[in-house]
Amino acid sequence: MDANPILAETVRGNWVENRFRGAYAVVDASGRVIASAGDIERAIFPRSAIKSMQALPIFARHAEEKFHHTSEELALACASHHGEDDHVATARGLLSRLGLSVADLECGAHAPTNPAARDALRATGAEPSALHNNCSGKHSGMLSVALAMGVPTAGYVGREHAVQKAVRAAVEAVIGEELTEDKCGTDGCSIPTFAAPLRAFAYGFARMATGEGLSPELGLAARRLFDAATAHPHLVAGTGHADTLIMAAFKGRVMQKIGAEGVQCGAIRNKGWGYAIKCDDGNPAASQAMLAGLLLKFAEPDAEQKAVLEKFAGQVIKSVRGADVGVLRTLVA
Amino acid sequence: MDANPILAETVRGNWVENRFRGAYAVVDASGRVIASAGDIERAIFPRSAIKSMQALPIFARHAEEKFHHTSEELALACASHHGEDDHVATARGLLSRLGLSVADLECGAHAPTNPAARDALRATGAEPSALHNNCSGKHSGMLSVALAMGVPTAGYVGREHAVQKAVRAAVEAVIGEELTEDKCGTDGCSIPTFAAPLRAFAYGFARMATGEGLSPELGLAARRLFDAATAHPHLVAGTGHADTLIMAAFKGRVMQKIGAEGVQCGAIRNKGWGYAIKCDDGNPAASQAMLAGLLLKFAEPDAEQKAVLEKFAGQVIKSVRGADVGVLRTLVA
């Protein structure tokens, strides 16, 4: 297998310490590759980077008509949230309106990602619940789909459950590729994840950003989800996270979502371009450096947006005593 | 730059998710390369993997004659410890005998690496101190060198301080390479770290393991340090860590030390071979998988040793709910 190019590196003092290889694609809604590096046909697991695609059945299966998801709940369905108060309250609110509870979530419990939220929860003596799981918004949305479809909610994470079949069909419709059992694994939150070419995810994001090539219903659903996510950047990740800061700075113009193991997907909406990045070794910080380089290059940032991106394009490495001793920097330029 | 080979990978379900490139060298004390993969002449930062080399001035500068370091204190000088009770007590004990205190440590404070020790400290309401820093044993040893040399202890972490010059000279003597300012950075604990060819570190470990090519004094010092580290594997890392488990299983036959950013160095002492590994992207778990593959291949493990190594050669990846969803596995075979 040919090696992908080095797209980020860490430098300590005056010498390169680590090298991060990867691939990226910027694609328009016609499928034209605007720019790329590395092997963009290699199938990658998109993980949480495509939660907005996985949320499409909320519309396609008419859950939104029935339960009137708020813009905040739609944003949280697209989120890997940090377990802060607004995240937990939003997930709890939807579950309650569905007549369900935390006991119906099948994502598992983990401590809040946000350190302050984690400490605050610990101080109460309570154990983390599935509501604190970064995927609780996505799972609450999936439960609404099960109810709208009139199928049992139990087991909704299973590959053969109607909800996951609907999710799979929605992703296939958007990325224009068949998702197959020979490239399938289980995500951290217990739902299936299917690998597909990196290019196809960028293409899917371009189609969601523009509606081009999608049915009117799917196009409208995509717009509602992107509008919700970009209107509530804090709900999509959390305090200090790149996705939150970048979407806030771009004021609706960029949809951005991290996925586990070095994946980044999103869209430069005003240009109608989707993008997808995979850091070969799965390093999240390196993938954020690659992302920042990509947006600096292709998203025409203004001064404020540029300032946000530059913090991730060149991430300072500090000693324990707080001295600057190196930098993790993008090589996408 | 040619890409190094893929030496570890993660598989999720039935598809490869991440790839980890790197290089390794197994070298004997004559400098003969027994086995290698990738570019072993590329200069890498060894970071904490060479703490045993950095501890040599405890002997070379006669600190050991003056302060009679215990075997435990010598082991801790070679350690990246986890801040457990025995680690903290051992560092505090040496400092006290030196007439110094935690205030003289210049490594900075961080919370114990061991989660139980971290929680226990937090429960007392006390802040982490420099004693909990994984490098406090190395730094206590360096303070003993400053005292033995009759130089001020303050500023002992600086590149121009006599202690760091002695450390640099010792490393150069052992690895047979000049360490130069054009390949230099600052480690997390504030001391200088110099990059040198991966092969040279493997060579240095072979020479320390055998004494071959070293002065009798340096050879004896190396033996004392390796004996101490392998006699007290828990002091060199901590509960559950690969270095501790591997050294315990090999009962003195393998000296093993992790370094930050995907470095592994050590020696198969009964064979007189040193080894060094660098995972290009710095992933520690992947470097441990590579290490386990290397030791399975070259260290002639018995059944018990093999069982320990296999846990790191194939590391199970779990979902939040605890199901096995993948594996991080070595490709060194």
Image (cartoon, coloured by chain):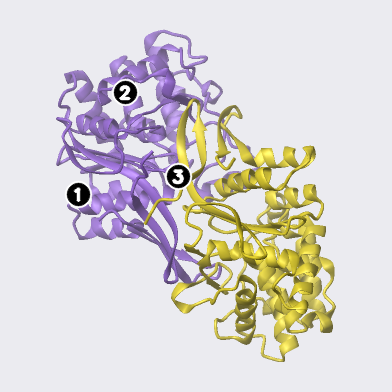
Chain colours: A yellow, B purple
Whether callout 3 and callout 1 share a subunit is answered yes
Residue under numbered circle 2: B171
Residue A264 seen from this side? no
The image quadrant that residue A313 belongs to is top right
Q: In the rendered view, tell whether residue B79 sits above or below residue B300.
A: above
Where residue B244 sits: x, y (%)?
A: 35, 47
Marks 2/1 in contact by CB < 8 Å: the verdict is no
Relative to the observer, which residue lies in front, B196 or A209?
A209
Relative to the observer, which residue lies in front, A201 or B138?
A201
Q: Gap between marks 3 and 2, in whole Å?
A: 25 Å
Answer few, some or many: residues within 10 Å of disc 1's Cα (few below 14, many 20 plus, some between 14 and 19): some
Q: Which mark is first along the chain, 1 or 2? A: 2
Where residue A137 sits: x, y (%)?
A: 72, 69
Q: Secondary structure at mark 2?
A: helix
Q: Secondary structure at mark 1?
A: helix
Query: Residue at coordinates 41% horizontally, 21% vertically from top-left?
Result: B142
Residue B88 seen from this side? yes
Q: Gap between marks 3 and 1, in whole Å?
A: 24 Å
Residue under numbered circle 3: B281
Left or right: residue B161 versus residue A143 is left
Residue type at mark 3: give it.
Asp
Residue type at mark 1: give it.
Phe
